[in-house]
Image (cartoon, rainbow, N blue to C red):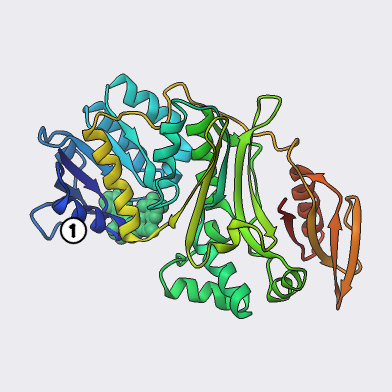
Amino acid sequence: MKVAVLGYGTVGFGVVEMLKKAEGLEPGPVLVRPGKDDEPFKVTSMEAITEDPSVDVVAEVMGGVEPAFSYACAALKAGKHFVTSNKALVAAKGPELAKLAEENHVAFLFSAACGGGVPFLHNLSLAVQSDEILSVGGILNGTTNYMLDQMQSTGMSYADALSDAQKLGYAEADPTADVTGLDALRKIMLACAVAFEVLPVEGLLHEGIDSFSAADSSYIQSKGFACRLIASGGKAENGSVYAYVEPVLFDSSAAERSVLKNFNMAKYNGKNAGRIVMIGQGAGRWPTASAVLRDCSDICSGRRIMMKPSCKAGSADNSACVHRYLVRVPADVALPLPIKEKEAVGESCYLITDAVSVQAMHEAAKALRENGASVFFAAIGE
Ligand SMILES: NC(=O)c1ccc[n+]([C@@H]2O[C@H](COP(=O)([O-])OP(=O)(O)OC[C@H]3O[C@@H](n4cnc5c(N)ncnc54)[C@H](OP(=O)(O)O)[C@@H]3O)[C@@H](O)[C@H]2O)c1
């Protein structure tokens, strides 16, 4: 099968190189911006791909919602299978693309958009065929895992950990989506869409690591904890879907503590299979390109669906998800939640709440920050 590639950046270059060596696959034309077509295999118009009958698969690795969405529609309508590594595109337009793929009898796969090289969505979409999935989630952002690991293993400041991650190419020049938890949120949205046929687009909550300080790191370690950024999704007892991202504290018995550097740990819980955990490189040229190639090979084997065409955009309901939280607030600020323990450290106060809903915790932190207070919070892992 011939695979056209949209975008020739970090992942695009990796995809083209891997296609040259892959069994049953070969690279086709590569879409680049006008003026950058300095080699014969590069083209500058989407029509050159959609109108090329030798192209079987279009792999989009450009990023962004537009023009990626228009190009995806054009490819699917032209009868080309469509593969993407672009979580922003799938989080915004996944159900529309799944339907369009079905109407045109072609595949729409997006393994690389969640977990990089970790075959999370690949396995999850197979598992839903034979098992009821109860929950999905884990450490889905390698940049923040790297930063948290650096801060907790070396005592490094948040600013130095971020600059280190940028130097190593883990964090982008604008790291906002990573450090605020938005990137992990988009990934859990995709996992929910695959597992539960609902792409939650409303009611979502995300807290990142941008409030985590070196002082917080040393405090939680003195209590025997380590912090990881965790994305959680699942089916609540009332049938609604929950989806949120927040820092979580783990004691020394937790498997999450063994996930270091920029690694991901993706997991799902099947009613019959139980807990399945996958650890690996969540980003980077070669791991991500390998996931794109895996989707292309899956298409060769007849696989067509990752998100069911019946998947609909919907609302997340996080009101029934309940945790105890560790919260750091300024010493003179009251947290409007039930408190079990309190310890003053300099000008700050660390509090342990009773079990409260995720929604209540996120709303309380938001309200305090709107009044100018510096707040860090993390759920206490059970
Ligand atoms: N890098 C990773 O580790 C990783 C991991 C998982 C998923 N992803 C996803 O993979 C996608 C690509 O990431 P990346 O790291 O490879 O980004 P990148 O290095 O910035 O590469 C994107 C390439 O696409 C090109 N491009 C953008 N818009 C285009 C257009 N309209 N026409 C032609 N070319 C266009 C860019 O050209 P210009 O440079 O001229 O703008 C650039 O060469 C993103 O959706 C990202 O979220 C990346």
Q: Which amino acid does label 1 sit on?
A: Gly
Asked whether 353 or 64 is in front, the reply is 353
**Residue extending furthest toward the left:** 40
Residue 155, placed above or below residue 76: below
Q: Is residue 180 left or right of residue 42?
A: right
Give the image location of residue 303, x and y in percent. 29, 30
Q: In which quarter of the image is the N terminus?
A: top left
Q: Is residue 180 visible?
A: no
Q: Which image quarter: residue 123?
A: top left
Asked whether 76 or 65 is in front, the reply is 76
Which residue occupies 45% across, 37% down? 124
Residue 276, placed above or below residue 36: above
User: How many discs mark residues in the rendered view?
Assistant: 1
Residue 159, placed above or below residue 39: below
Q: Which image quarter: residue 257?
A: bottom right
Q: Is residue 232 left or right of residue 367?
A: left
Give the image location of residue 133, x and y in percent. 55, 31
| Image quarter for ligand 1 | bottom left
Q: Is residue 223 visible?
A: yes
Give the image location of residue 369, x and y in percent. 77, 59
Give the image location of residue 273, x and y in percent. 52, 34
Residue 155, placed above or below residue 32: below
Asked whether 184 or 29 is in front, the reply is 184
Secondary element at image label 1: loop
Q: Any atom of ligand 1 within 8 Å of the CB at mark 1? A: no
Which residue occupies 73% across, 71% down? 216
**Label 1: how many residues lie within 10 Å, few (<14), some (14-19) or many (20+)?**
few
Q: Mark 1 points at which residue?
A: 35
